[in-house]
């Protein structure tokens, strides 16, 4: 059977805030049948993961381009690849290590990043969210980089986002005191209510982030899980305790502006002996099996929950992506095709 495969390409490099006109929807015929002698598989994409880091791939220049395969630049006119889950509809061989894409079907060749999802009691979408790369990022970043101890104080930014809401829950399950910040009252209520954070604040309503952190952490912060960079990182460092740890997961407040860069007080870092460490989830594949086992157990016993924010239809991917930078999403942003 032949289908018309629709896919998005990048029309122009993203400069500043992304816009729908940066993307172009194209289509081409695709034969849904194994090709003799080919080692390719054809996957019908079911859920596409919508991730902030992709914006750095869409820029003409970014430090991300030389870091890892999945963070390389997306060239103009090429299909936009992305993480996701799908169903193999035609296969001639085994393919691994391919990303799926902002498209209906992905043709994956040898050297791709495909992995087979084991039979699972969880919804398929969980394999892109809590049991996928967001979950691994939260788990590895929190346990490997932050090295929490019971009773420590933990601050999480973008706390109602895909990674942040999981970090906060891991921290509570580790016996920590956890405060999150987010950009709306609805998110703050969710953090303090359903997700069990000890406290939360809406950073958009605070006149001074430094004072907000002093109010929430009268005895200082031991661990800061940083998703946003910028002035939040500066204020967190100013409020850290001696021997505090900062896991630098992301810097979303800096992604849409080449001028905004955090400048934490390095004398604080020195005299408080703070560890500030960037990381990529991908470096912690060694804890993947442990992460799946621990997290599945928490989910099964209702000790943890996954919040997902699902849009529908391929055409909605660019707007879902752009909305991440306005803070419209609550939990993991996915598009179901
Ligand atoms: N190191 C790694 O391996 C790795 C892996 C995955 C993700 N990340 C990074 O982790 C961070 C979170 O990713 P995610 O997938 O979980 O996204 P997400 O938190 O689900 O979505 C992004 C959120 O960031 C907040 N935000 C947007 N613009 C902001 C700004 N200017 N200032 C402050 N907050 C802003 C918004 O929430 P508010 O309502 O709170 O503003 C928005 O909902 C990103 O920086 C991402 O690049 C890193």
Image (cartoon, rainbow, N blue to C red):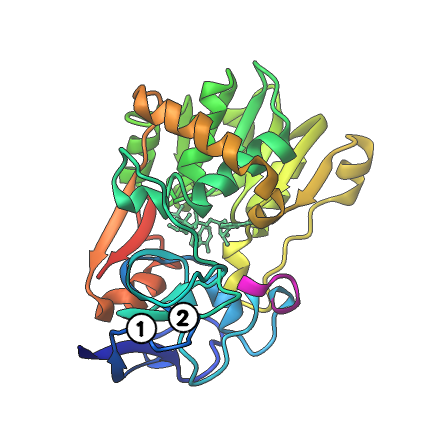
Q: Earlier in the sequence, mark 2 or mark 1?
A: 1
Question: How far across and how far down the image is residue 169, in percent?
Answer: 42, 27
CA–CA distance between discs 2 and 1? 8 Å
Above/below status of 255 relative to 201: below
> Residue 23 got which mark?
none
Nearest to the observer: residue 311 or residue 99: 99
Name the residue located 17 percent from the left edge and 77 percent from the top edge.
1
Question: How far across and how far down the image is residue 82, in percent?
Answer: 41, 63
Please give left or right for residue 216 compared with residue 303 in the image.
Answer: right
Please give left or right for residue 122 compared with residue 231 in the image.
Answer: left
Indicate whether residue 84 is drawn in magenta: no
Q: Which residues are magenta?
A: 65-70
Nearest to the observer: residue 87 or residue 282: 87
* Residue 312 visible in the picture: yes
Above/below status of 189 relative to 207: above
* Residue 208 visible in the picture: no
> Residue 40 got which mark?
2
Quadrant hosting residue 192? top left
| Residue bearing mark 1 | 34
Per the picture, the main secondary structure of the magenta-coloured stretch is helix
Name the residue located 48 percent from the left edge and 80 percent from the top edge.
13
Above/below status of 106 relative to 114: below
């Amino acid at each position: 059977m032949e289908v018309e495969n629709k896919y998005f390409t990048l029309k122009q490099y993203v400069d500043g805030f992304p816009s729908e006109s940066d993307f172009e929807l194209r289509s081409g015929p695709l034969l849904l049948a194994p090709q003799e002698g080919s080692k390719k598989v054809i996957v019908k994409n079911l859920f596409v993961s919508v991730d902030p880091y992709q914006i750095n791939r869409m820029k003409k220049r970014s430090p991300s381009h030389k870091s890892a395969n999945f963070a390389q630049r997306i060239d103009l006119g090429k299909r936009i690849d992305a993480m996701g889950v799908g169903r193999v509809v035609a296969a001639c061989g085994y393919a691994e290590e391919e990303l799926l894409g902002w498209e209906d079907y992905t043709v994956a060749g040898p050297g791709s990043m495909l992995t087979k999802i084991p039979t699972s009691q969880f919804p398929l979408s969980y394999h892109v969210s809590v049991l996928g790369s967001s979950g691994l990022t939260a788990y590895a970043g929190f346990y490997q980089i932050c090295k929490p101890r019971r009773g420590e104080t933990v601050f999480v930014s973008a706390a109602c986002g895909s990674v942040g809401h999981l970090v906060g829950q891991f921290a509570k399950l580790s016996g920590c005191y956890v405060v999150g910040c987010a950009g709306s009252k609805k998110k703050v209520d969710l953090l303090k209510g359903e997700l069990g954070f000890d406290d939360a604040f809406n950073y958009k309503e605070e006149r001074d982030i430094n004072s907000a952190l002093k109010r929430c952490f009268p005895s200082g912060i031991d661990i800061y899980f940083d998703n946003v960079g910028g002035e939040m990182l500066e204020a967190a460092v100013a409020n850290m305790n001696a021997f505090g740890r900062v896991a630098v997961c992301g810097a979303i407040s800096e992604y849409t502006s080449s001028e905004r860069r955090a400048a934490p007080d390095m004398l604080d870092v020195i005299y408080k002996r703070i560890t500030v460490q960037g990381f990529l989830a991908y470096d912690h594949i060694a804890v993947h099996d442990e992460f799946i086992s621990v997290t599945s157990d928490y989910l099964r016993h209702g000790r943890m929950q996954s919040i997902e924010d699902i849009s529908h239809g391929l055409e909605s991917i660019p707007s879902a992506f752009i909305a991440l930078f306005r803070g419209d999403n609550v939990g993991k942003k996915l598009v179901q095709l």
